[in-house]
Amino acid sequence: GTTLGASAAESGRYFGTAVAANKLSDSTYVGILNREFNMATPENEMKWDATEPSQGQFNYSNADRIVNHAQANGMRVRGHALAWHSQQPGWAQNLSGTALRQAMTNHVTQVATYYKGKIYAWDVVNEAFADGGTGARRDSNLQRTGNDWIEVAFRAARAADPGAKLCYNDYNTDGQNAKSNAVYAMVQDFKSRGVPIDCVGFQSHFNSASPVPSDYQANLQRFANLGVDVQITELDIEGSGTAQADNYNRVVRACLAVSRCTGITVWGIRDSDSWRASGTPLLFDGSGNKKAAYTSTLNAL
Ligand code: XIL
């Protein structure tokens, strides 16, 4: 293939990017998006603060712009994210206990129902585990409603949209460590008890402090062996030139070596689109030119 999406499709995979609704009027951005990618993840537009700014009042306008653009241009959509400690609307941040649990469940049900049939995979729960060596859940208002909040969210999502794959998504789980071990144990427990879960997302935000782990492929494989798909969901790698290109190549080869690794999403198109305050972590430069990292990614697909 001559594009990322077409090349990924040759092995039955997708190649996606985070998409920002306010950039859909940028012709350079849209040109690359439509040419290269066949999966779109709304970067912020499906988060709780965006879709339910006031309790019970849903606003899908910006998310719909992305979904409509994707559908019109042959891309599928990864939904991101139904339940997360971050980017909650103020009203939810101020809730706790039963009121928050009910609000969360209603949010999952409403959003997944609204998009029923239009989402390839949902990040149902994002970033619920703590960093470091404890393997504990992250403390959050959602966690304080009870340890079962994650399975409640997954069951609500399944009931609302039985056709969407349901993913757990996190960062610093890309290699084998205490945090990924804890996620692994949760997925194993969900599978053994019949809690609906279909996939695990590995954000894969890499930099010099958090490089591509040496056991990246082995970690993807051990999750796949639990009977879930794995996906690389928010890939970006700080750096430049050959070193960056080699890292992208290694990540892509790891996914392709795992049969249940169904696709890769980069977290933005041009370096200037990155959520990172500085640096050059993406596949296209600020002018939209292909970088060495683009070529090494394409060559690995
Ligand atoms: C980031 C977006 O890229 C930014 O625009 C926003 O200001 C903050 O969130 N993990 C996730 C993503 O799951 O939702 C985050 O996206 C990046 C880290």
Image (cartoon, rainbow, N blue to C red):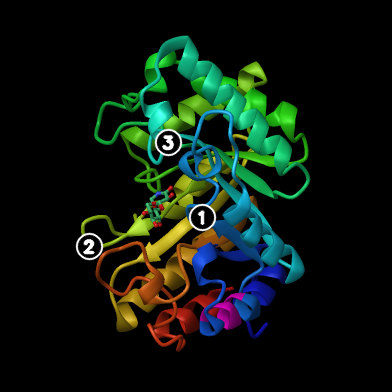
One can see residue 196 in this view: no
* Residue that badge 2 annotates: 208
* Residue that badge 1 annotates: 232
What stretch of residues is rendered in magenta? Answer: 29-33
Percent x, y for residue 3? 62, 81
Q: Amino acid at mark 2?
A: Ser
**Quadrant where the image shows the N terminus:** bottom right
Q: Secondary structure at mark 2?
A: loop
Q: Secondary structure at mark 1?
A: strand
Q: Is residue 59 above or below residue 97?
A: below
Q: Amino acid at mark 1?
A: Ile
Q: Tags 3 and 1 in contact by the CB under 8 Å rule?
A: no
CA gap, disc 1 to disc 2? 19 Å
Q: Is mark 1 within 8 Å of ligand 1?
A: no
One can see residue 234 in this view: yes
Q: Is residue 48 above or below residue 249?
A: above
Q: Amino acid at mark 3?
A: Pro
The first of marks 3 and 1 along the sequence is 3
As drawn, which residue projects farthest toward the top?
A: 98
Q: Residues within 10 Å of mark 1 (few under 14, many from 20)?
A: many
Residue in front for this viewpoint, 134 or 17? 17
CA gap, disc 3 to disc 1? 27 Å
Q: Which label belongs to residue 89?
A: 3
The first of marks 3 and 2 along the sequence is 3
Q: Tags 1 and 2 in contact by the CB under 8 Å rule?
A: no
Q: Is residue 295 above or below residue 217?
A: below
